């Protein structure tokens, strides 16, 4: 058994919260530049240039890319041969609290009914996964409310098939319009069960933009959906144009013979996630 | 190329009447911030016949919950939040003189109707460009609801704050116009 102190986890989570909020991923920067070539709308081009400038200011001045520094989603892959000294849950939440405080990040978590802010941006949304090995991998992904609000889950009939899936995803994006801060990434979950499909759509967002789905039938479906969504003409910020979605990412899982669950989780252009392996 | 229309609040009917969906504007002067819970509290005050924390006549409300300022800075990142969540409250504020709103995303038909009726406009700033937008904010003061943290009402002094007119007083909507222009039917 390899021992990892919870204090180390706390410190890493704190750093990841700050780093993810200040430094936009290279895949997103590359997608903006590609978008500049594809975009036909002059306003759309100006928006993409502004987003590149915004990312540069955030990186150099250590300011959050977006004021909505999100709910802190934390994905943890725990190796079977790892023994954590102390409470991992407490360590992650302490790391989030410290990162959001010392990093001048916005605290956006509140009681759902009274709307009273917890003032620490905790509790974080933490998801554990047991994997082989003696390593611990932590991914911190701050997710903004604007794009999160556009997500939906539906339970289609098996008879609806792949056409039903396409209709649901395209309709969802058409209705989302400018709300989720396009250019967006569209995460699609297919299969599993009600709770599983939401996670599939969420995990799909963590895949780098520009990476190809290893399953050819899903890669083809991703391309088709991307083209159809962009053909709606909504463009950057929904003001009209070609480049509304940067990518469609699909994650699939076997499902029940009675079900065809589909989930959509939209991510704004400030697609933030940073990971570390201890 | 600088084809921006300069705006200095408060705005009157004459200023608002000239703005058309799709116009680019640069706003300088005082604007006020409010989002979800601040809107609810303001409408509760109006329902109780009490005054608002600021006189909304001719003013612009910016839907924003800024990130905290680093020491020596005026403000942290401060881009717009999604506007439809303020739709249940916006017409009530236009009734008492509000002339402009800044946010992102489409508005409900009844809000667009209220803009026509009360001669008010809706602007969008670039969602997710909070670090860039913060550069046009020169001074910030919390004037109400400090307990709401990022949702407190702030009085902001801005300089050349860039936005685009989404809905004008004539019922035009640049989201619909822009989309129709670039849509491709298969």
Image (spheres, coloured by chain):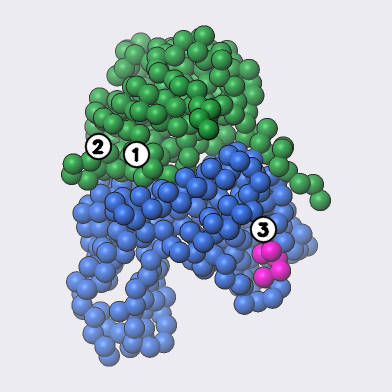
Is B182 part of what is drawn in magenta?
Answer: no
Residue at x-position 27% and y-position 64% = A15
Residue assigned mark 1: B134
**What mark, if any, has residue B74 been given in the picture?**
2
- Judge whether A161 appears above or below B165 on screen: below
Q: Residues within 10 Å of mark 1 (few under 14, many from 20)?
A: many
Query: Pointer 2 and pointer 1: residues touching (CB < 8 Å)?
Result: yes
Image position, residue A44 (x, y; %): 58, 43
Looking at the image, tell me whether mark 2 or mark 1 is earlier in sequence order. 2
Residue at 72%, 37% in the rendered image: B180
Give, as a single range, the part of the protein colored magenta.
Answer: A219-223
Q: Foreground: A89 or A37?
A: A37
Question: Disc number at residue A226?
Answer: 3
Host chain of mark 1? B
Q: Would you say A260 lies left or right of A198 here?
A: right
Instruction: Tell me how far mark 3 sits from mark 2, CA to CA.
Output: 40 Å
Q: Residue at x 63, y 49 (%)?
A: A39
Mark 2: secondary structure: loop
Q: Secondary structure at mark 3?
A: helix
Letter of the chain that mark 3 sits on in the rendering? A
Query: What's the CA distance linking mark 2 and mark 1?
Result: 8 Å
Q: Position of residue A185 (x, y in %)?
A: 55, 57
Image hue for chain A: blue
Q: Are the residues under badges 3 and 2 in a single subunit?
A: no
Q: Position of residue A177 (x, y in %)?
A: 60, 42
Judged left or right of residue A124, residue B14 is right
SS of the residue at dot 1? helix
Mark linked to residue A36: none
């Amino acid at each position: 058994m390899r021992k990892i102190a919870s204090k180390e986890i706390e410190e890493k989570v704190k750093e990841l919260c700050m780093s993810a909020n200040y430094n936009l991923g290279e895949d997103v920067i590359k997608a903006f530049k590609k978008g500049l070539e594809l975009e036909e709308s002059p306003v759309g081009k100006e928006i993409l240039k502004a987003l590149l400038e915004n990312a540069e200011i955030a990186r150099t001045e250590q300011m959050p890319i977006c004021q909505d520094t999100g709910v802190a989603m934390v994905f943890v892959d725990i190796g079977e041969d790892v023994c954590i000294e102390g409470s991992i849950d407490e360590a992650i939440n302490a790391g989030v609290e410290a990162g959001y405080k010392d990093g001048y990040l916005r605290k956006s978590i509140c009681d759902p009914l009274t709307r009273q802010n917890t003032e620490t941006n905790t509790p974080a949304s933490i998801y554990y996964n047991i994997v082989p090995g003696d390593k611990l991998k932590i991914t911190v992904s701050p997710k903004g409310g604007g794009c999160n609000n556009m997500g939906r889950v539906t339970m289609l009939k098996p008879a609806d098939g792949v056409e039903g899936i396409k209709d649901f995803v395209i309709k969802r994006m058409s209705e989302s319009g400018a709300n989720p801060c396009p250019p967006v990434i569209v995460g699609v979950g297919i299969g599993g069960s009600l709770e599983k499909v939401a996670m599939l759509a969420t995990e799909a967002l963590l895949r780098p933009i520009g990476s190809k789905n290893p399953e050819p039938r899903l890669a083809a479906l991703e391309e088709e959906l991307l083209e159809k969504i962009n053909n709606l003409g909504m463009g950057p910020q929904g003001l009209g144009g070609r480049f509304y979605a940067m990518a469609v990412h699909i994650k699939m899982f076997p499902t029940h013979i009675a079900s065809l669950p589909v989930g959509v989780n939209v991510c704004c252009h400030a697609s933030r996630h940073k990971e570390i392996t201890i | 190329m600088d084809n921006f229309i300069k705006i200095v609040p408060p705005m009157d009917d004459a200023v608002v009447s000239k703005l058309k969906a799709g116009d680019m504007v640069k706003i300088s002067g005082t604007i006020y911030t409010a989002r979800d819970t601040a809107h609810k509290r303001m409408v509760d005050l109006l329902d109780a016949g009490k005054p608002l924390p600021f006189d909304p006549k001719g003013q612009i409300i910016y839907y924003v919950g800024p990130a905290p300022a680093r020491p020596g800075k005026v403000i942290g990142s401060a881009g717009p939040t999604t506007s439809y969540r303020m739709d249940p409250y916006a017409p009530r504020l236009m009734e008492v003189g509000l002339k402009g709103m800044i946010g992102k995303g489409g508005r409900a038909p009844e809000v667009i109707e209220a803009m026509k009726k009360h001669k008010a406009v809706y602007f969008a700033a670039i969602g997710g460009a909070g670090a860039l937008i913060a550069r046009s904010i020169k001074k910030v003061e919390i004037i109400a609801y400090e307990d709401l943290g990022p949702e407190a009402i702030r009085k902001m002094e801005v300089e050349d704050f860039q936005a685009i007119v989404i809905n004008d007083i004539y019922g035009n909507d640049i989201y619909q116009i822009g989309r129709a222009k670039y849509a491709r039917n298969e």
